[in-house]
Amino acid sequence: MEKLLEIENLCTNADDKQILKGLDLSINSGEIHVIMGPNGAGKSTLANVIFNNSAYTKTSGTIKFNGEDITNLKTNEIAKKGIFMSFQTPEEISGISTLNFIKTAKNKIEGKTIYLPDLKKEIENDMSELGMKSELLHRDLNVGFSGGEKKKNEILQMLVLKPKLAILDETDSGLDVDAIRTVSKGIEMFKNDENAVLIITHSTKILESLKVDLVHILVDGKIVYTGTSELAKEIETNGYSKFKEGA
């Protein structure tokens, strides 16, 4: 297994508040990692900082991807390296169809013009597997989509763009049981020995049908404990109290 993501001593501020406080994380190819933690712990901040979101300021630490330092790369450059992130609340973009959005992103990542009929066929096959209506492909991106359709659309983009690392930031939030199963199915479709997935979640439902390698507990800006998938079940039963005490 190759080391895909390596984060060392990452400290980050938003305005004058420190959020990440010396965070370390390492993810190898072929792995699924999960980050859980109480509200305000810094979970979504971590996802945004990996992508160098300008709302956050790194004060120390490094982020390496495939052995390359990407700490200060621009967001679009990071995406081209092979990192994908789904959002808690996907944006609605009027005037751009789902098909055109995915096609443009695919062209940018591949560095060449993709043959549209082949791409469309691939997208439609994935949509069928995810239980998505094909008409959504020609509608403006996420405009008028239900919450479940928006989240499935994020998974669709992941499947088509084929990143090396997919970061799923609470993709399961607000979804019913059936939609969560569909999202889990999409992750299973995507996962292989050459890529990796980082799931940020409050719930264990999305993990039930996935083979998770490691679960990390993030409290007050640091990963304070790492364990197997059994750790997620313990959190569901007992909460984060004992981890907060040790933070």
Image: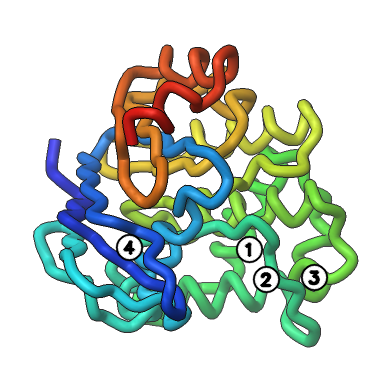
Dots 3, 4 in contact, CB < 8 A: no
Q: Nearer the viewer, mark 3 or mark 4?
A: 4
| Front one among 19 and 114 | 19
Q: Residue at x 34, y 64 (%)?
A: 50
- The part of the image, by quadrant, that contains residue 123 is bottom right
Residue where numbered disc 3 is placed: 138
Q: Nearer the viewer, mark 2 or mark 4?
A: 4
| Front one among 16 and 166 | 16
Amino acid type assigned to the residue bearing label 3 in the image: His
Q: CA distance from mark 2 to mark 3?
A: 6 Å
Q: Is the residue 98 above or below the residue 219 in the image? A: below
Amino acid type assigned to the residue bearing label 1 in the image: Lys
Q: CA distance from mark 1 to mark 2?
A: 8 Å
Dots 2, 3 in contact, CB < 8 A: yes
How busy is the neighbourhood of tag 4: few (under 14 within 10 Å), some, or many (20 plus)?
A: some
Q: Nearer the viewer, mark 4 or mark 1?
A: 4
How busy is the neighbourhood of tag 3: few (under 14 within 10 Å), some, or many (20 plus)?
A: few
Residue where numbered disc 2 is placed: 99
| Callout 2: SS | helix
* Upstream in sequence: badge 2 or badge 3: 2
Q: Residue furthest left?
A: 67
Dots 1, 3 in contact, CB < 8 A: no
| Callout 1: SS | helix
Q: Which mark is residue 82?
A: 4
Q: Residue at x 16, y 65 (%)?
A: 62
How busy is the neighbourhood of tag 2: few (under 14 within 10 Å), some, or many (20 plus)?
A: many
Dots 2, 4 in contact, CB < 8 A: no
* Upstream in sequence: badge 1 or badge 3: 1
* Upstream in sequence: badge 3 or badge 4: 4
Residue where numbered disc 1 is placed: 120
Q: Is the residue 234 above or below the residue 104 in the image? A: above
* Upstream in sequence: badge 4 or badge 1: 4
